[in-house]
Image (cartoon, helix red, strand yellow):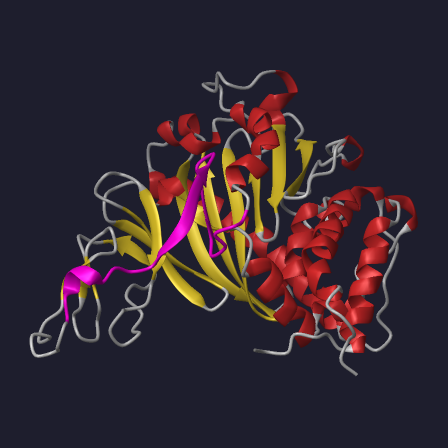
Amino acid sequence: MPDHRLSSEAATLLADLRRYAAEPLDATRTTPPAAYNSQEIYDLEMRQIFGKGWVCPGFAADIPNTGDYITYSIVDQPVFVIRDRDGAIRTFSNVCLHRMMILLEGSGSTRKIMCPYHAWTYDLDGALIGAGHMQKTTGFDRKEYCLPEIRTEIWNGWIYITLNPDAPSISEELAPLDPLLARYGMASYVPVIHQDQVWQTNWKLLTENFMEGYHGPVAHKATVGAGIKLEETRFPEERRTAFTYSTFTKPEGAPYGTAHPDNRRLEGLWRRTALMPTIFPSHMFSCSPDYLWHLSLRPKGPGEVQVRVGVALAPENYAAINDLDAHLAPLIQFFDQVNAEDRIVVEGIYKGSLAPLASSGPLSWLEREIHDFMGYLAKALEPELEQGSPKS
């Protein structure tokens, strides 16, 4: 059994995190710098957070038809998410039961899943339906083989998966968000952009960057930060354990972030208000009246994270498009610029966290969600902190 006792350095980092998370927002500090680059803390997060929690591989509308699939991973476990013949979205281990070959790559559509190594073939429900040249293997019966299925839930159009059979239902955990999201009709948005990138930063820094608008008028002054009135940022009164969120209102006439004239769902200020939830640990999205921008993170190491980026359009915005390619060109350019602006700062912060003189700083009221996130991390990592004496 592996020795998961913490070193004294890691135990001190977690103790500081716990203390800062418990202090009032106006009198606390940010997460200790070393918590972003410690291999030991990273390994702990993989066990306690990503190995036990819910993660989001994508939007249900990404796989609208029978046989459509996307691939993902939970820590070291490759998976694929597929729409089966009954229309249900299911998730399976993406590893062949014969010689452990990865079955599917990327995204696409298929009538069956065939291993590229020895052509073992599986149906859309994970059952083995073909295994050539196995007739001389004593006792082999393909009907006894089925790919392990991964627990899956659909919430407001999002796919969530977990390796943990005991994790609370994500739909129940996120239920307080339902009334807010209902006005947008988010599940009806149409996916138009999908990218996978690798950034040289810690996953927590990218999550925290998304959660705070404090940097918007500075880092995003050429894009989404234009016209943002930080003083109009709103946060929920009640703190939750599974998520946090903020809302902000765009000015009249903004190029993105306001409702189409055909939008009959939204009224008043909601016609130019975005709801930005962060679903702990690593799924975040901005649901605006006209578009949905989302990120899903898969850490690859303390200083590297795989970023899945997507954009979907509100149905009335999508319906009004005459030339999709012409419409998407400036949209892609816009969001590529937003992502590039974010990448500069989160990779820069990671480099700064490695500096010997780096230290925790005070939090602004605009970083309320970061404080919420710190509370989530402290709670999620707490069990290991309580496991006896640290390693010397």
Left of 390 or right of it: where is 222?
A: left
The residue furthest front is 139
In front of the other: 196 or 138: 138
Name the residue located 57 percent from the left edge and 54 percent from the top edge.
339
Left of 322 or right of it: where is 245?
A: right
Residue 52 x/y as whole percent = 55, 57
Q: Would residue 303 be seen by someone viewing this image from the given angle?
A: no
**With respect to residue 43, does 343 lie above or below?**
above
**With respect to residue 160, does 271 lie above or below?**
above
Left of 127 or right of it: where is 363?
A: right
Taking the magenta stretch, the answer to whether it contains residue 152 is yes
Residue 303 x/y as whole percent = 63, 71
In front of the other: 186 or 130: 130
Taking the magenta stretch, the answer to whether it contains residue 247 is no
Q: Which residues are magenta?
A: 140-167
**With respect to residue 293, does 120 lie above or below?**
below
Name the residue located 66 percent from the left edge and 75 percent from the top edge.
39
Name the residue located 43 percent from the left edge and 66 percent from the top edge.
77
The residue furthest right is 27
Residue 296 x/y as whole percent = 52, 53
The C terminus lies in quadrant? bottom right
The residue furthest bottom is 392
Q: Would residue 105 be seen by someone viewing this image from the given angle?
A: yes
Residue 267 x/y as whole percent = 58, 16
The N terminus lies in quadrant? bottom right
